[in-house]
Amino acid sequence: MTTSTPAALLDRRRLLIGLGALPGVAALASCSGGGSSGSGGDVPQAEYVQGSSSLKVGLGPEIDGVPYPEGYVGPKARESEPFGDGAEFTILTRSETNLDLAKNTHSLYLEEKTGVKITYETVPQGEEGAPKVNAVISSGDLPDALMLGPEWMGGFTKAQLYVYGQQGLFQPLDQLIDEYAPQLQELFEQNPDLRATWTAPDGVMYAMPAVNQCYHCASSAVRTWVHQPTLDKVGISSQPTTLDEFEEMLIAFKGSDPAYRPFSGEKSTPPFGLIGAAFLDIGVNWLRRDGDQIVYTPVDEKFRQVLITMHRFVADGLLDPNAFTQDGDQLKRLTMDPAGSKTGVVQMGSQGGFADIDYSDPAARYREFVPLAPFKGPNGDPIIPWNESHGDATGLVITNACEDPAMLVRWADFQLGLLPTLEMRLGVLEEQWTWASPDDLGIDGKSAVYTKIPQGEDGPSNLTWPEFGPYNLGMDVRHGEAVDPESSIEPMLYDAGKLYEPYRNDLSAVFASPFFDANQSAEIGELRTNIDSAFAQVSTQMVLGDLDPNDDADWETYVASITNAGLERYLEVLTEADRERA
């Protein structure tokens, strides 16, 4: 078991707060020029040196009476005065059902508090909005800023920030941040590596970040749940601690009902998690470091043992073959069967991914599933890939059309404070939320900072924003919400994270996605798509029996299929970009 002191954990959290996922697609608009050769170390550097200017504006005084818990790290609630004097800007952002940004309560709150007036233009989230974003960028008729949210909304990847920044479409913000962003400066002090993770290889920050640290998300990719009533039914009083005991548990499940599916899942989350962790560090996005080498773990010889084990489980009726082909609705029909769940083990980040969440029902099915602890493999303790890449997103990008970028930096920076962050998420202070009472506990069991005020079914609408702009939901802010385990899933997810954290992988093994230039971005997106497709196909064949992982020739076929999809070049591009970051 890997152990860490609290200080070490904080250092690790600071280091990894900005780690991002690899881009799955190329830049939104076609790009040319502006890219490095990929040879490492030859990227032209910005003239401005980060930190060489001093703040010209300061933080307001703290508001009294806010119940910060001991050791709180995060933004404070502060008094503020408007600074915009009616300055007007146009920002392209996201649309959402029943969201009218011109009349939205949080939009009006920001205008009142900052004195900055924003005209919002909108595009849909995700793929539906991509053509319009493309058209805006390609036309050259840019708004003053773009506020398109995290990557899951279709927002910019760091690769895209770098590409468009080098093309001159996005303004460098470093000097403006040093002079006009006291909230962000405080955030940098609290998380010393955050600035580096947002700095492109040319030494420039091209975006104001948003922070959303999610503790339980770090292990969500491999988190697995077990149906407690089935454990009770077969007389198992404690969870398995070894792979052999896990197999014995599945056998007992199968023996209780021949039609029962001991271990199931769905195709978007193939259940490699805890079985893989019992043999090796499978990495984040299947990538890990081994010294100076970047390793794609599905072709690691140790991963063959994972496939052999899962192949055997399928053959013995312990692992549902449909786990690799069925969708989420089909899985939910198993777990939500009126007669009781028809499966005992499911890999999913949250019970909400496979069961209905009904807080009003104390016997709701999701409550029957408890986190399954990692178990030892043949070589000892399991290794959980700990992915802290959920901690940041692009908050605001300022384009070359903006004539007063300093004012927009101040506007974005204001939103990184505690009050604006909570108003953005919850609504109006003393109407939708208030400061917590001394006996209120937060998600992490510490004293809570704030608590929601029940609204009822007819409460006001158009109050808040989706998470598409700048905000600072640091770990202690997120966990500072007063919760009741009977009306929130968050405490259960937090406890699941604590169960997995002792087995987190070593920091030296973590591969964090670097920035990519235009050529690298386009190439890496296509390569990853091809490799992911090849792996999904041949791993399913291995597990379901079309190929036999015990057979050397079939193993060679498996490796060749992934390699021929472009694996060697994929790792070369990752290594090139990684060296440029270094």
Image (spheres, helix red, strand yellow):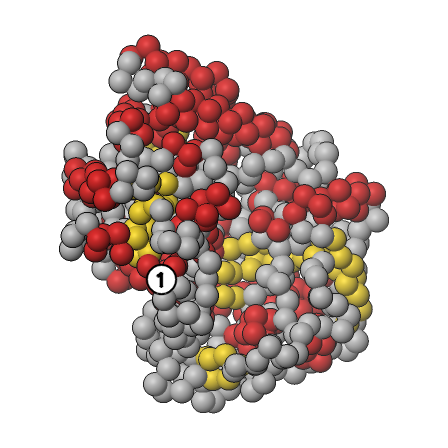
Q: Quadrant of the C terminus?
A: top left
Which residue is more in the foreground, 5 or 485? 485
Tell me what residue is drawn at x 70 percent, y 61 percent.
97
Q: Is residue 548 left or right of residue 407?
A: left
Q: Is residue 433 left or right of residue 221?
A: right
Task: Classify residue 207 by image quadrant.
Answer: bottom right
Tell me what residue is drawn at x 55 percent, y 77 percent.
419
Tell me what residue is drawn at x 67 percent, y 43 percent.
127
Report x, y in % for residue 92.
74, 56
Which residue is more in the foreground, 51 or 105? 105
Do we see residue 180 in this rendering? no
Tell me what residue is drawn at x 22 percent, y 40 percent.
255
Q: Residue furthest top?
A: 553
Image label count: 1
Report x, y in % for residue 578.
46, 35
Report x, y in % for residue 66.
45, 85
Which residue is more in the foreground, 176 or 265? 265
User: Of the residues shown, which amino acid type is indicated by label 1?
Assistant: Arg
Task: Classify residue 106 by image quadrant.
Answer: bottom right
Q: Residue furthest bottom?
A: 64
Which residue is more in the foreground, 254 or 274? 254
Q: Is residue 345 above or below residue 556?
A: below
Q: Is residue 88 above or below residue 2?
A: below
* Pointer 1 residue: 367
Q: Residues within 10 Å of mark 1 (few under 14, many from 20)?
A: many
Report x, y in % for residue 401.
79, 54
